[in-house]
Image (cartoon, helix red, strand yellow):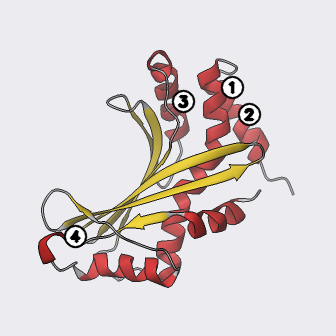
Amino acid sequence: MNAKKKAGEFIIGFFVGIRAKGGVMIDPFAQRVVDFLDEIGVPHSQLRLRGGTDSKIFDLHHSLQIGDEMFIYEMAVHVSGRVLTVWTFPLVKIPEDKLPVIAEYAARANYGLWIGNFDVEYVPDGRIGFKSTLSCESAEPGFACLRDWLYLGFSIISDHLPYIRRVISGELSPAEALTALEDATRITP
């Protein structure tokens, strides 16, 4: 399944929560994100405010069937000022004894990435995710920009997840897993 097809299935199925806290108005940049979600038909019901009134967190949840396996993802879209940050986490608990090899996988995977990076959370969840940040200081992001930014983390983490699982199982080392991923996704003319 190609990344665009996966992303298209993803965008249809996720849940986003939005709620104004105490009647606080959502700033224009955050409102653009809300308008985008409305435009693609995503229902919303809750917004969590963190770090003051200028920081908005939109929670997104999605499940995706790939072959025989169901993948469940959690995303957080953080709008602070004119910066949009998207975190994408597959809901895969990493056993504590496997966190060091997953941290090595993340460090190796991050080498050469142009946009975004892998993060490993040791506490409290023991999980790996992908974070990407977009600064929109000079212009309002359009539909295509917001769509692509939401899809980016989902597409990258979906490509890596089967190899992350193989590292967790001990089948492959981080270096072997990344080589296998590169071989599997190499485009040949």
Badge 4 amino acid: Gly
The Cα atoms of the two marked residues, 1 and 2, are separated by: 6 Å
Q: Can residue 122 be seen in this view?
A: yes
Dot 2, how many residues are within 10 Å of its Cα: few (below 14), some (14-19), or many (20+)?
A: some
Query: What residue is disc 4 on?
Result: 81
Secondary structure under the numbered disc 1 in the rendered image: helix
Query: What residue is disc 2 on?
Result: 180
The answer to whether mark 1 and mark 2 are in CB contact below 8 A is: yes
Badge 3 amino acid: Tyr
Dot 3, how many residues are within 10 Å of its Cα: few (below 14), some (14-19), or many (20+)?
A: many
Horizontal and vertical percent position of residue 96: 44, 19
The Cα atoms of the two marked residues, 4 and 3, are separated by: 32 Å
Secondary structure under the numbered disc 2 in the rendered image: helix
Query: What residue is disc 3 on?
Result: 105
Establish if 171 lies above or below 86. above
Q: Which of marks 4 and 2 is nearer the N terminus?
A: 4
| Residue 52 sits in quarter | bottom left
| Disc ID at residue 176 | 1
Establish if 50 lies above or below 108. below
The answer to whether mark 1 and mark 4 are in CB contact below 8 A is: no
Horizontal and vertical percent position of residue 36: 44, 80
Identity of the residue drawn at 40% across and 72% down: 44
| Residue 75 sits in quarter | bottom left
Q: Which of marks 4 and 3 is nearer the N terminus?
A: 4
The Cα atoms of the two marked residues, 1 and 3, are separated by: 10 Å
